Amino acid sequence: MSNRSTEAAVLLLTARRTGELLPGLPAAVAPRTMAEAYEVQHAVMKGLSAGIAGYKISIFPDGATAVAPILTPLGTANGAERSLAPATRMGIELEFGFRFAKAVAATALAADVLAAIDTTVVTIELCDSRYEGIDGKAREVLVADMISNQGWVAGTAQKFDGARNFKGATCRQLFDGKVQTERTASHPNGDPLYPLPLLPQALAAGGYALSAGQFVITGSLTGLTWVAAPLLVEGEIDGFGKVACRLVG
């Protein structure tokens, strides 16, 4: 672990604890490579004494992949309250989560990855950044901050069936019981299953491994919506189920 990575992690940990946003990471400590970005992730997890419930995988416009751990303490039960504090906002993304019944090796083929999935979970990814804004930030700086993950809410779970049409489902997002958006699922990569075969190598690059019981989210179906508390947030994906949480200050 380099001194640069340790110092960057201290800044991000302070932002998490106080809610005071950073303009970015100073050039003297900002990760310059993906390996350094993952060093920062690991240092933040150590500072939080946090386990890993699952991962998010992102594919950047140039095709590069990155992962971020979803930390166990940041999970919210379906229908439960979640405090925004010390933040004052939260980003909402309705997604598919895929829970794995078996560990996945770094050398696993696409078919092996899909065969290891046990259930599909309707999920709300809770998002926030420790930066004042993410536009224009280097990929490595975003990855160091867990790619803006701030937790998750797990809703209805069903047995995974890879033959289903995940990209054609109608989904809706409701705020305080009113439909905020209703649309055919629109995934950044076209198909919510698309990133899954890329998982093994992406995880290995970050120094991670996918264990039985962990889950993976692959990208928003409705886009990112910023909200403030108090607010009841609900998500529905037709044919798959529902998820909800109540945001409080």
Image: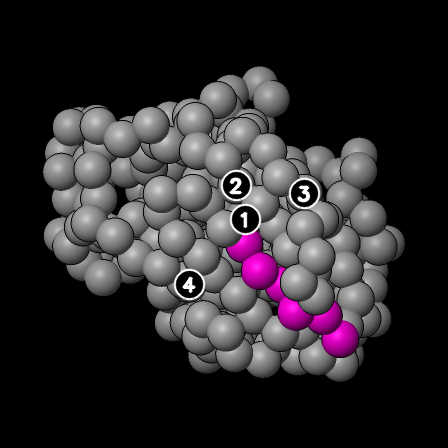
Residue 20 percent across, percent down from the top left: 83, 71
Which residue in the protein does label 1 denote? Answer: 94
Q: Earlier in the sequence, mark 1 or mark 2?
A: 1
Q: Earlier in the sequence, mark 4 or mark 3?
A: 4
Which residue in the protein does label 3 denote? Answer: 181
Q: Earlier in the sequence, mark 2 or mark 3?
A: 2
User: Mark 2 is on which residue type?
Assistant: Cys
- Quadrant showing the C terminus: bottom right
User: Mark 4 is on which residue type?
Assistant: Ala
Q: Are marks 4 and 3 in contact (CB under 8 Å)?
A: no
- Element assignment for label 4: strand
Residue 248 percent across, percent down from the top left: 70, 79
User: Mark 3 is on which residue type?
Assistant: Thr
Q: Is residue 33 above or below residue 157?
A: above
Q: Magenta stretch: residue 231 in it?
A: yes
Q: Quadrant of residue 101?
A: bottom left
Disc 3 versus disc 1: distance between alpha carbons? 11 Å
Which residue in the protein does label 2 denote? Answer: 171
Instruction: Give, as a single range, the part of the protein colored magenta.
Output: 230-235
